[in-house]
Each structure stands twice: as C-alpha cells, then as structure tokens.
Image: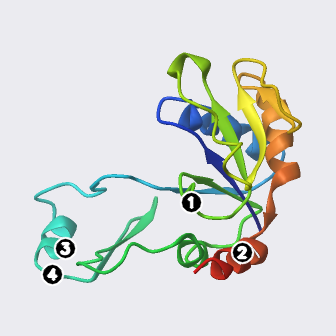
Amino acid sequence: MKVIGLAGWSGAGKTTLLTRLIPHFNAQGLRVSVIKHAHHQFDVDVPGKDSWRHREAGAAEVLVASSNRWALMHELRGAAEPRLPELLSKLSAVDLVVVEGFKREPHRKIEVHRSANGKPLLFPDDPGIAGIAADTAIDTGLPTVHLDDVAAAAALLLRAAMPVEEAVAKSAAIR
C-alpha cells in the first residue's frame, strides 16, 4: 500500500483533480482510498436520525451498516485530533491512499496550484513536495504537469507515492 498527498491552498483544485484521478486509477485496475482533512467542524450524519441521536447521547462510536455501505463515526469528545499515521492504520488495504490536506505531515505530496488564487507556492518551504500540478508554468526543478492533464498527473502521483510504512516512520520521527 502506498500513500501520496495533494497539498495546496483552498480553491486550487485539489478535490476537482482528485475526483478526476480516481476513475483514471480505477480504470488501471488500482484500488484507491482517500483521507480528507477538514479544517472545521463537520458532520457526516443527519440530525434527527437514529445514528445521530446515538452520537448525541454520548456514544464513543456509531457504526451504521446497510447492504450498500457501512460507516464508522468516532467522536473525539475533547481528545486530540488523530494524526495521519493513526488514520492510515484504520483503512483497509488498497493500492493507493491519496491524502487531501494534512500538509504539515511529512509524507510526500504533489502541490496543486492555480494561478488565479494569487497564493504563493508551497514547495519552496515544504520538503515533502515531490511535484507540482498547476495551470501555469512553474520555475522549479521539481517535476510538473498541467492541472488538466489527468494522465500525467496520475503518473506523477504514482511515481511519487511512498510506502505507507515509510510515511508512518517519517511522521513518528517528527513527534
């Protein structure tokens, strides 16, 4: 199992790129999972439904299952936000895990950059950035691809992906 991150400012196109990459990887026979970091309070449950009521009543975890999917919701209840290695350990084995966010973790990342954002590039300050997908030419020695070239972006992600064990070890080293 390998892991690669997508890093960039809000509005750069990380999610759009990822939703185009996943079908591309699937067509190549690869199984892909995603870990997405949310910077704000979010809820995957529907207020008023039984599972929501169970969490609101104080359950530490609520697992909802049907014939189509299952979902496990874990309430932190004041505990520290889990770091990437802990979250990686919760996933089933797949070929590739793409991490959107967690830019402070030391795993390898592809920077997604959109010039219209007017934001600075991250790569000069983040040694974990192994390549750039952008909508404009970037002056760097790093490999770059155009943001709309899904096949080239997919190849870049696969080349830069690192074994999960290596990502976990790097993260442990900065604790």
Left or right of 83 on screen, residue 174: right
The amino acid type found where label 1 is placed reads Arg
Image quadrant occupied by the N terminus: bottom right
| Amino acid marked by disc 4 | Gly
Q: Could you tell which of marks 1 and 4 lies nearer the N-terminus?
A: 4
Disc 2 from disc 1: Cα separation: 12 Å
Corner quadrant of residue 78: bottom left
Mark 2 belongs to which amino acid?
Lys
Secondary structure under badge 1?
loop
Up the image or down, 46 lies above or below 19; here it is below
Query: How far across and down, in percent of the image, does residue 44 sit?
Result: 31, 56
Q: Residues within 10 Å of mark 1 (few under 14, many from 20)?
A: few
Question: Disc 2 or 1, which lies upstream in sequence?
Answer: 1
Q: What separation in Å lies between label 4 and label 2 (alpha carbons)? A: 35 Å
**Gap in Å between the C-alphas at discs 3 and 2?**
34 Å
Give me the C-alpha separation between circle 1 and circle 3: 30 Å
What residue is shown with label 3?
55
Residue 14 point in image, percent of width and height: 58, 37
Q: Which residue is mark 4?
A: 58
Label 1 vs 3, first from the N-terminus? 3
- State how far apart marks 4 and 3 are (Cα): 5 Å
Which of the numbered marks, if any, corresponds to residue 170?
2
The residue singled out by tag 1 in the image is 104
Mark 1 vs mark 3: give the one in front.
Answer: 1
Q: Amino acid at mark 3?
A: Arg
Would you call the spot at circle 4 few (<14 residues within 10 Å), some (14-19), or many (20 or more)? few
Q: Helix, strand or loop at disc 4?
A: loop
In the image, residue 115 lies at what x, y percent?
61, 19
